[in-house]
Image (cartoon, helix red, strand yellow):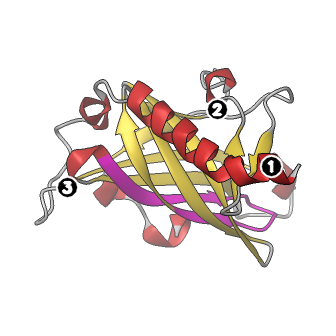
């Protein structure tokens, strides 16, 4: 067992590097060249999911409460990306994360530092961008995660992640249209 642990970190690095090479065909175009450029010539793209939480409304309640998920990418040079991914349910604790990673071939592969319920952890997150929709990669039960030597939760087999669903995706929105109080 000790012999295996010695090779786990280098193997994890090799796997992540291989994944990044596989995804390195043409994703920078997926973040749309028509996004605003800032002074460092980076591109921004913002995505939002929003629905009314039916569990928080009754006849006496006048205010609608929303479940929101907000993702903002900043594409840097060399297909590197950073950003935020905030999950903001109406009735439960928020899950707020910042991330760094790469974008290639329609996919964004990142390491997120997440904060929720008083805990902080790091995990791999993978997104797929198609037209004006962003799909968050999720794992079916049979695609487990493991914690590497750096303490980051990684997918065992990234090729088995599921993206496309008709029920859940984030729509691209103009970044300047975001009400910061709602998503940050």
The residue located at (78%, 52%) in the rendering is 5
Between label 3 and label 1, give the one nearer the viewer: 1
Q: Look at the numbered disc 1 and give the secondary structure of its residue.
A: helix
User: Which residue is under mark 3?
Assistant: 42
Q: CA distance from mark 1 to mark 2?
A: 42 Å
Q: Position of residue 131 (x, y in %)?
A: 36, 24
Question: Which stretch appears magenta?
Answer: 80-98
As drawn, the label of residue 3 is: 1
Between label 1 and label 2, give the one nearer the viewer: 1
The residue located at (66%, 24%) in the rendering is 162
Q: Look at the numbered disc 3 and give the secondary structure of its residue.
A: loop
Q: CA distance from mark 2 to mark 3?
A: 28 Å
Which label's residue is closer to the chain start, 2 or 3?
A: 3
The residue located at (73%, 64%) in the rendering is 62
Between label 2 and label 3, give the one nearer the viewer: 3
User: Which residue is under mark 2?
Assistant: 168
Q: Report if residue 123 lies within the magenta region.
A: no
* Viewer-proximal residue among 182 and 28: 28
Q: Report if residue 85 lies within the magenta region.
A: yes
Q: Is residue 168 left or right of residue 76?
A: right
Residue 113, image quadrant:
bottom right
């Amino acid at each position: 067992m000790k012999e295996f642990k010695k090779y786990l970190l280098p193997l994890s690095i090799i796997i992540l590097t291989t994944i990044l090479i596989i995804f390195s065909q043409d994703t920078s175009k997926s973040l749309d060249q028509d996004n605003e450029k800032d002074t460092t010539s980076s591109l921004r793209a913002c995505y939002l999911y929003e629905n009314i939480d039916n569990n928080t409304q009754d006849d006496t309640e006048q205010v609608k409460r929303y479940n929101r998920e907000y993702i903002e990418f900043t594409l840097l040079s060399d297909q590197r990306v950073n950003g935020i991914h905030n999950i903001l349910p109406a009735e439960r604790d928020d899950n707020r994360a910042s991330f760094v990673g790469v974008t290639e071939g329609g996919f964004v592969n990142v390491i997120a530092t997440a904060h929720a319920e008083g805990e902080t952890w790091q995990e791999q997150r993978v997104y797929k961008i198609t037209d004006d929709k962003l799909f968050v990669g999720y794992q079916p039960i049979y695609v487990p995660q493991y914690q590497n030597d750096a303490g980051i939760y990684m997918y065992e087999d990234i090729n088995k992640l599921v993206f496309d669903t008709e029920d859940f995706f984030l729509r691209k929105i103009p970044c300047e249209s975001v009400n910061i109080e709602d998503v940050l």
